[in-house]
Amino acid sequence: MRPRDLSYVCQQTSVEACHLMYDLGKPTEVGFDLLPTKTCFDDCMEWLEAEAKRGEPLDGWLLCHGLMDHDGQEYSHAWLERGDKAFDFHLLGTAKVMSQWKLEDYLDEHKPRGVTRYTPIAAVEENLRTGHFGPWKEEYRKWCRRMTDLSEKYQKEAWGPGPWQDEADRCEWRYDGFPCLIVRGSVGALCGYVAVPPGHPWHGAHCDSVDVAVHGGLTYSGRCGGNICHEPMPGESHDAYWLGFDCAHFGDVLPALARVDGRPFFDGMTYKDMRFVIVEVEKLARQAKTAADNASKLVAPRVEL
């Protein structure tokens, strides 16, 4: 996909970084391809959350889920609409950008089918009901284009030079009694996790309901599954519950998109390396310990009669 009209190159916003905004209403072409982020459902929810945190009214915003085709392949997709505009997220080089379209042009270009439009309140209700950012309907979920297909196209050796080439892709340890884990995602960004045992106040809680200070905020919660799991120590419960964060937010460098074809990093973007993520994971573990200690103080002492 190519942007067809560069109406303004860079608009500063207060959402942690610079969003490159495009009006795609005219036939002028520019030199960079816009690539899918593979995280469109998260991107749209994060944008609405950022708008709310800035105190901006959410009236008129619609979160849209639907089916599209690309090169003969059907996939599910999320985008935003407001009035006569549509907004989509892409990767331009290694930067995540938002593109702005005339709504009629966007619908004509992408021809989405089976579209469901959610108000921000309805989207939050679905998020709380399911525990994730979508898609929420089964007819979309089965066509969800997973981030894992990036790994087939972008092998680590093709990411270009950087600290990621000499780092491990997985790291496990314990801190303050909590299992800790770092896993590299398909776009090359590191993700950090801490597991809490049954009885901990965070066990079973949705990540949005746990108030912690960690890079980008918590974006994951769930029991052991796939790469987010570990081997419990003898006597330790197998019912560990993981909470985690990722380093693929606005302003974060995504190494898998820093390919050898010269796509640039943009000013202000930084790669969150293994040392950075270890510090953040251990900070999360300390907060988990504080939460457990505070909860234990609320338990009334047993009185023997």
Image (spheres, rainbow, N blue to C red):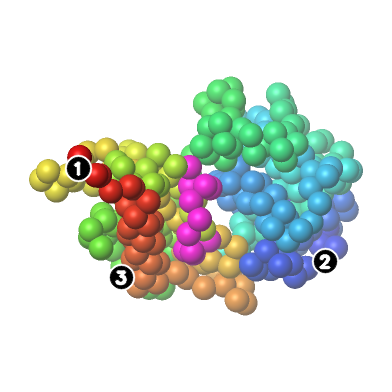
- Report whether residue 90 is seen: yes
Up-down: is 193 above or below 95? above
Q: Earlier in the sequence, mark 2 or mark 1?
A: 2
Comparing labels 2 and 1, the label whose residue is closer to the camera:
1
- Quadrant housing residue 197: top left
Name the kind of residue labelled 3 in the image.
Answer: Asp
The span picked out in magenta is 206-216
The front one of 178 and 219 is 178
Q: What quarter of the picture does the C terminus occupy?
A: top left
Tag 2 residue: 8
Q: Earlier in the sequence, mark 3 or mark 2?
A: 2
Residue 240 picture location, percent across and down: 28, 43
Tag 3 residue: 166
The front one of 135 and 93 is 135
Tag 1 residue: 304
Residue 196 picture location, percent across and down: 31, 49
Comparing labels 3 and 1, the label whose residue is closer to the camera:
1
Q: CA distance from mark 3 to mark 1?
A: 59 Å
Name the kind of residue labelled 1 in the image.
Answer: Glu
Residue 172 picture location, percent across and down: 24, 58
What is the secondary structure assignment of the residue under circle 1? loop
User: Which residue occupies 44% across, 42% down?
Assistant: 205
The front one of 232 and 192 is 232
Residue 100 picture location, percent across and down: 79, 52
Q: Is residue 160 left or right of residue 181?
A: right
Q: Earlier in the sequence, mark 3 or mark 1?
A: 3
Q: Is residue 152 left or right of residue 21?
A: left
- Quadrant housing residue 20: bottom right
What is the secondary structure assignment of the residue under circle 2? loop
